[in-house]
Amino acid sequence: MRYAAIDIGSNAVRLLIAEIIENNGSVSFKKNTLIRVPVRLGDDAFLHKNLSDKKINDLLKSMQAFRNLMDVYKVTDYMACATSAMREAKNGQQVADRIKEEAGIDLQIVHGEVEAKIIYASHAEVNIDKAKNYLYIDVGGGSTELSLFSNGELLASQSFNLGTIRILDNQDRDETWNEMKDFIREQTRGLKNVYGIGTGGNINKLYRLSQEKDGTPMSYVKLRALYNYLNSFSLKDRINVLGLNQDRADVIIPACEIYLTVLKCANIKSIYVPTVGMVDGIIQTLIEKNYSTFS
């Protein structure tokens, strides 16, 4: 059995096709195919509050291709979610309607709080001591989702309009940065030894660049050093010398800035990077929907 997850983000759109594995009453999944297309809807949504015809056509073609792949893989269930860029675009729902009509994909434009819930449904903490305190940090192109856990219980969760594309387009606001800092300070006050859990494409790439052993947290000091190293290169050299993809080489710098700000504000000294993201959370959400053994 196969499930599919579609994530329409501000920087890229992704399709994950996963094999569902049932074993002695437990259900898990194995990633089969992961496709990422750098459509970058956020440039239109944050600057002009509308998606242009070109972006819409690129998105429609991507969704039609995803639909064809889902059919070839004989996917039995899927979930498609759009986040910050589609939320802010005035014609976002019209585009979603066209995707339904022309690609046969039922697309949900989800609020930031729902996005955060899907992200931490990825079970990123599965191999981590639940008795400790953790701050989930997911940095996207248009928004940052923060969720604070203590002893395995969700204490607080909030979405902020701070993201990599938004920063590159100078659409981030000081009051939003301050609002996020205030949230972090208020929610972590009185908690000792808070650890970070980072999700999303940029922190996954940063973790690989850090050459940490899988499962080992990355220190704040190492992340800061990595940021300084990357920032010492021009955009062109981050692509040609360091080998970063063109659509990753620019956003990785503001992503670092957000992660470092959050870690410093929460006095977090290390961050776990389980290399999961929105699509993993969508697959887990489908499993929990379809199997009564999950609540």
Image (cartoon, rainbow, N blue to C red):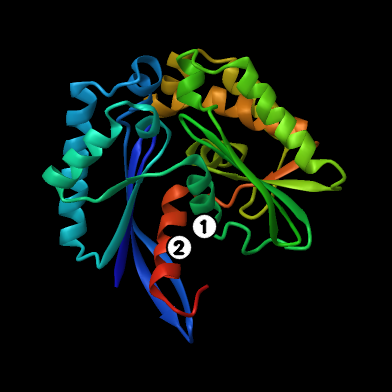
| Res 38 seen here | yes
Residue at the spot 13% in from the left edge and 45% down from the top edge: 101
| Residue type (three-letter) at the residue carrying disc 2 | Gln
Seen in the image, is 66 located left or right of residue 10?
A: left
Numbered tag placed on residue 122 in the rendering:
1
Residue at the spot 41% in from the left edge and 51% down from the top edge: 279
| Res 250 seen here | no
- Residue 168 point in image, percent of width and height: 48, 17
- Residue 61 point in image, percent of width and height: 16, 37
Marks 2 and 1, how far apart in space? 6 Å
**Residue 255 against residue 152 in the figure, above or below:** above
Q: Earlier along the polypeptide chain: callout 2 or callout 1? A: 1
Quadrant into which the N terminus falls: bottom left
Q: Is there CB contact under 8 Å for labels 2 and 1?
A: yes
Q: Nearer the viewer, residue 168 or 253?
A: 168
Residue that mark 2 sits on:
284
Local secondary structure at mark 2: helix
- Residue 93 point in image, percent of width and height: 27, 36
Local secondary structure at mark 1: loop
Residue 244 occupies quadrant: top left
Seen in the image, is 56 located left or right of residue 190?
A: left
**Residue 294 against residue 69 in the figure, above or below:** below
Residue at the spot 64% in from the left edge and 55% down from the top edge: 215
Farthest residue, direction left: 102
- Residue 255 point in image, percent of width and height: 56, 28
Crowding near pointer 1: few (<14 within 10 Å), some, many (20+)? many
**Residue 291 against residue 133 in the figure, above or below:** below
Crowding near pointer 2: few (<14 within 10 Å), some, many (20+)? many
**Residue 117 against residue 159 in the figure, above or below:** below
| Residue type (three-letter) at the residue carrying disc 1 | Ser
Residue 165 occupies quadrant: top left
